[in-house]
Amino acid sequence: MTKVRSRSKHTQSNGKSGPTATSSATSAGQGDQAATTTLTTKDANGGGALRVDSDGNAIFPVQKRPPMYIAIRTFFKVCLHTFYANVEVEGTENIPPTGPAILVANHSNSLTDAIAVLSTVPSKSRKMLRMTAKDTFWHTASPFGYIIRNVGTVPIKRRKDYNGEKVDNSHSMDALTESLGTGSCVCLYPEGISRYNSQMAPFKAGVAMIASDALTRYKDQPGFNLTLLPASINYLHREKFRSDVLVTYHSPIVLTPQQDPELTSTDKQVRQEAITKLTTLLENTVRSNLLDAQDWRTVRIGHVARKIYAGQLGTRISLGQYVRLTAKFVTAFGAHAKMMQEESSSGGGEGAGSGSRRGSLQTQDESMLNAAMSETTLHTGLETRRSKESSEFIQKLARDLEAYQNELDFYLLKDYRITQGKPPATVLLSKLFQRLLLACLLAVISIPGLVLWAPVFLAAKYQEKKIREKGPLEDNLDEIAQYKLLVATMFLPLIWGFWVLMTFPFALITAPGIIILMWLTIRWLEDLVHNAKSMLSLLRLLFIAEETMDSLREKRLDLAKRVQEFAVDALNLPEDPEDLIAENKVHKQSAGWLGHLSKSYFSIKRRRRKDWNEVMRLHDISNYDQ
């Protein structure tokens, strides 16, 4: 059996090795924390010398970043934080600063995934990453192709690009293995291709095979170890402007030739079994922190359940907590749907195991057990019910949650409006008037910047329409964000240059002024759109019948009781959702009166949000394109 060791955050942050096997998880390159010996060894290229620390780990030199890499990484970071309103990153302390490493991530948003990874790995955590990309970027002339080719990216052939024919990637695999031998960190996507789907595709064995090849090739090199760093990338609405992104770096898996001999075995069967087990471990780890279900309907129902259970928390919990909380419901409903399908096809069901565990939404390692826990707790958490009763309870709850959200969408109302009830007409009219005044102000001050942005918005919308029309959404929708970024990359320098030339006598003022104006315009437009959305909601409340509101409130109260029971008994969530706020380690206190003013009214950096999952639309996006 392949033995893999995870480096815990406690061990890493304190520089102390854990018990037994975890002692080998000390990050290669932490020479300031461990005394080095005089033992030297040739590096992977046959030249130079590598030091070995007191634990026997090879110490690789910190790689120098080419100027092009620094420029492109900075550019990508600006792109990511402009397109997405919130980019939350977890687990950066798990990233090894030096030494051979493979960053393993899910692939659901085409080139934007690479942008997300490059932008969220801090330079202090890792100086440089080597990416992989489809080899078609080497055969076509495009801005993205030029960028990709000049940052040390390794081309990978995909069957999809060669009419499904078998392709030879042996040269690329050799290049990746050699790169690991020099202490590089390589980013790979084991799903193979990017796609728009509610469920992550099964991992291919390529990453584990490369790890096996690297361990075999360098097994005689003293102190050689290889770190695998799983990463989960969550886009709440990947193609929507100013939506949210969560990137989670999990605890690393450290492999060594001495302690993982199965991966270097000359017995093909033993080696293949080890590769399969390692691939499964990586897949389960990455999947553990994703909103992952067999269909988009289940994801939608999970969002509704989370909203009813803890919607009042809003952004008082971190984006990571929000995703993990939603994932608990999604996984539970998905496991039940899968169980029902298996029973209907085979005439009976099988147990999913035994035992459950109460965990913390903030703990990343706990999320690895979400899938297994959810399937298990459907049997153990509701053990007071008969199996048939439990199944009917969950099935009816899912149907009623979906029906409730359909009604909210029809009336263009948010869930919290139902809990608050219908205010008097005078109150609604007063709020409408206030929002109308604010909308007029925001619209007026946005006009100059909107003129600058207009070509970008129109071209991006046209490109999105073309992508949606060219084929199945699963094959194309993941490319929308990529092409929107490409459109902005092409247009913005031209727009900026044109207006700087037009105002040349004042270029020293207009050059930075145009950039500031365009950014402020995005912020004003965000507030304008959400203010207009609130006005539409108030208008709906003004004209909606009391009987309709009473009916929605009764349905909501009934759902709240059942969701609470399901959350506490089946998912081991706290009875009081407010307890989750204490786990929010991302929240930062406002600094001084300026911070409090920014929080209470207007923030230049980002919009004040009541809840995650908001986008720049006049209505809430509760459905997913299918």
Image (cartoon, rainbow, N blue to C red):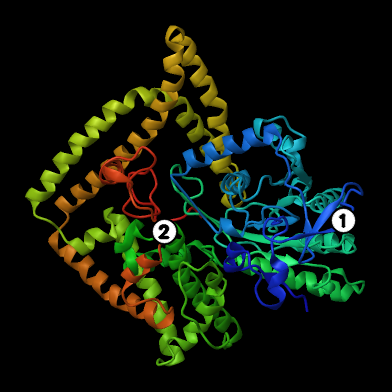
Kindly identify which residue carries mark 2: 318
Percent across and percent down for residue 59 are: 77, 55
Cα distance in 3D space between marks 1 and 2? 46 Å
Relative to residue 418, is residue 356 drawn left or right?
right
Residue at the top extreme, as displayed: 505
Q: Dot 1 surroundings within 10 Å: few (below 14), some, or many (20 or more)?
A: some
Residue 190 seen in this snapshot: yes
Residue 340 seen in this snapshot: no
Relative to residue 476, is residue 574 drawn left or right?
left
Marked residue nearer the N-terminal end (1 or 2): 1
- The residue drawn where x is 65% and y is 73% is 18
480 w.r.t. 223: above or below? above
Percent across and percent down for residue 392 are: 41, 83
Kindly identify which residue carries mark 1: 40
Q: Residue 557 is drawn in which quadrant?
A: bottom left
Query: Which is nearer the eye, 7 or 390?
Result: 7
Q: Which mark is residue 257?
A: none
Query: Which is nearer the eye, 329 or 182?
Result: 182
Q: Secondary structure at mark 1?
A: strand
- The residue drawn where x is 28% and y is 61% is 415
Query: Which is nearer the eye, 515 or 302?
Result: 515
Q: Residue 136 is drawn in which quadrant?
A: top right
- The residue drawn where x is 48% and y is 29% is 456
Three-letter amino acid code at the position of disc 2: Ser
Three-letter amino acid code at the position of disc 1: Thr
The quadrant of the rendering that contains the N terminus is bottom right
Q: Dot 2 surroundings within 10 Å: few (below 14), some, or many (20 or more)?
A: many
User: Mark 2 and mark 1 in contact (Cβ < 8 Å)?
Assistant: no
Relative to residue 429, is residue 256 drawn left or right?
right
Q: Nearer the viewer, mark 1 or mark 2?
A: 1
Percent across and percent down for residue 611 are: 34, 55
